[in-house]
Image (tube, rainbow, N blue to C red):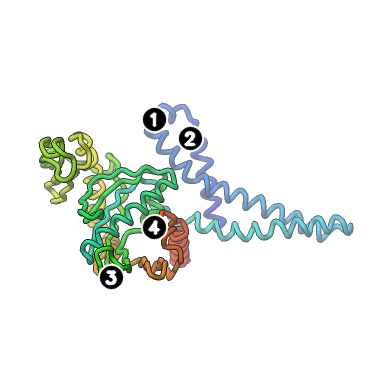
């Protein structure tokens, strides 16, 4: 591990020199690429340098304790050892995690798609609950949420809703939300007070950058139509809704949430790029495709990553066996504990595989 860390520090120093080189500064694209790489290595180098400093301090304190006959000096050295040793152990746990390969998508914005599965109106209502949960979580993080497309039901839920979440590291946190979410509660439509089980699927896609997906204009069929739903004369008589079909892949995206046709087109293109990128990656890596299909599933009750049980006020994530008895808080966007546990479990599994 120490050899790898030293190699990282050497690379960091090399990049530090390059990004201040006048010839590199003249090439803005190259400078930006090297600056990003430099910034990505910075957290590892900072921890490694702290680790080296702690190890040096420990070695000095141990030498003073062993060689100095003065009791006061030995006590000071003993105190120093007692303070530095726990920090050394903590850093030895943190550094292998920092060396794990980074997901290249982690810093990207995300496109999230929530769809009601089994359960009809109750599933649609819960899709609305999940959307509000993610919107509240994003608000807590200072991220921006923008609805792209929604298919609302009459009683306040969503048959489906797609939205973007813009914020640093959004994908690194929200990628674990892909899958089937199960809810157990008495629906508002149930007069007999019986508990029903419904399911909702969540898909989380990293937003593709323009340079990652080359979409030729001739590969697109763009249709405009009058938006449906609430909105009065403006919605009913103006063709602001957009449907874009990517002919080579057959992917269809539509958006009618904005009153401006241009804004609807921009939103639809964001989703289209994300879906094309996702499709390309799945075709390149069959294992990833199988994993994503197993995560998202069909929306059946038996397939679930998480259960929200209203009678018992609990949330259980079945992937890591974690149960929290604070359902109301979770649905209000307090999902940090769940996400942190999932990230920790993922890192532990990657460390296990790396050994």
| Quadrant showing the N terminus | bottom right
Q: Nearer the viewer, residue 326 or 270?
A: 326
List x then y, in percent, for residue 345: 45, 64
Residue topped by disc 1: 28
The reply to whether callout 1 and callout 4 are in contact (CB within 8 Å) is: no
SS type, badge 2: helix
Q: Tell us which disc is closer to us: 4 or 3.
A: 3
Q: How many marks?
A: 4
Residue topped by disc 2: 18
SS type, badge 3: strand
Residue topped by disc 3: 196
Q: Nearer the viewer, residue 64 or 297?
A: 297
**Picture quadrant where residue 309 is located:** bottom left
**Picture quadrant where residue 299 is located:** bottom left
| Residue positioned 71% across, 52% down in the render | 57
SS type, badge 1: helix
Left or right, residue 89 beside residue 176: right
Q: Is residue 290 visible?
A: no
Mark 3 burial class by Cα count in 10 Å: few <14, some 14-19, many 20+? few
The reply to whether callout 2 and callout 3 are in contact (CB within 8 Å) is: no
Disc 1 to disc 2, how far (Cα)?
Answer: 12 Å
**Upstream in sequence: badge 4 or badge 2:** 2
Mark 1 burial class by Cα count in 10 Å: few <14, some 14-19, many 20+? few
Residue topped by disc 4: 331
**Upstream in sequence: badge 1 or badge 4:** 1
Q: Is residue 40 visible?
A: yes
Q: Tell us which disc is closer to us: 2 or 3.
A: 3
Mark 4 burial class by Cα count in 10 Å: few <14, some 14-19, many 20+? some
**Upstream in sequence: badge 1 or badge 2:** 2
Q: Looking at the image, which residue sits at the far right?
A: 70
């Amino acid at each position: 591990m120490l050899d790898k860390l030293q190699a990282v520090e050497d690379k960091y120093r090399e990049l530090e020199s390059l990004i201040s080189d006048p010839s590199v500064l003249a090439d803005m694209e190259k400078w930006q690429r090297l600056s990003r790489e430099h910034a990505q290595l910075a957290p590892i180098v900072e921890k490694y340098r702290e680790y080296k400093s702690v190890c040096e301090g420990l070695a000095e304190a141990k030498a003073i304790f062993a060689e100095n006959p003065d009791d006061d000096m030995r006590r000071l050295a003993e105190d120093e050892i007692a303070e530095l040793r726990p920090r050394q152990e903590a850093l030895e746990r943190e550094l292998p995690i920092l060396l794990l390969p980074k997901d290249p998508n982690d810093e990207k914005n995300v496109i999230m798609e929530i769809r009601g599965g089994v359960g009809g109106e109750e599933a649609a209502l819960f899709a609305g609950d999940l959307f509000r949960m993610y919107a509240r979580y994003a608000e807590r993080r200072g991220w921006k949420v923008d609805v792209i497309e929604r298919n609302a039901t009459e009683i306040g839920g969503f048959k489906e809703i797609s939205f973007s979440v813009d914020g640093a590291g959004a994908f690194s946190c929200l990628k674990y939300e892909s899958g089937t979410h199960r809810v157990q509660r008495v629906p508002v439509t149930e007069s007999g007070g019986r508990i029903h089980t419904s399911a909702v699927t969540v898909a989380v896609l990293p937003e593709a950058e323009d340079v990652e997906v080359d979409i030729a204009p001739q590969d697109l069929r763009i249709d405009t139509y009058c938006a449906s739903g609430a909105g009065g004369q403006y919605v009913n008589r103006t063709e602001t809704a957009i449907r874009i079909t990517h002919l080579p892949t057959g992917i269809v995206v539509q958006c009618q949430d904005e009153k401006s046709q241009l804004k609807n087109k921009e939103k639809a293109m964001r989703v289209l790029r994300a879906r094309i990128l996702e499709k390309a990656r799945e075709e390149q890596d069959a294992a990833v495709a199988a994993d994503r299909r197993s995560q998202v599933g069909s929306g059946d009750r038996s397939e679930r990553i998480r259960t929200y049980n209203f009678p018992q006020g609990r949330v259980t994530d079945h992937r890591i066996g974690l149960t929290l008895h604070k359902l109301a808080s979770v649905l209000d966007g307090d999902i940090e504990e769940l996400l942190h546990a999932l990230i920790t479990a993922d890192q532990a599994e990657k460390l296990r595989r790396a050994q």
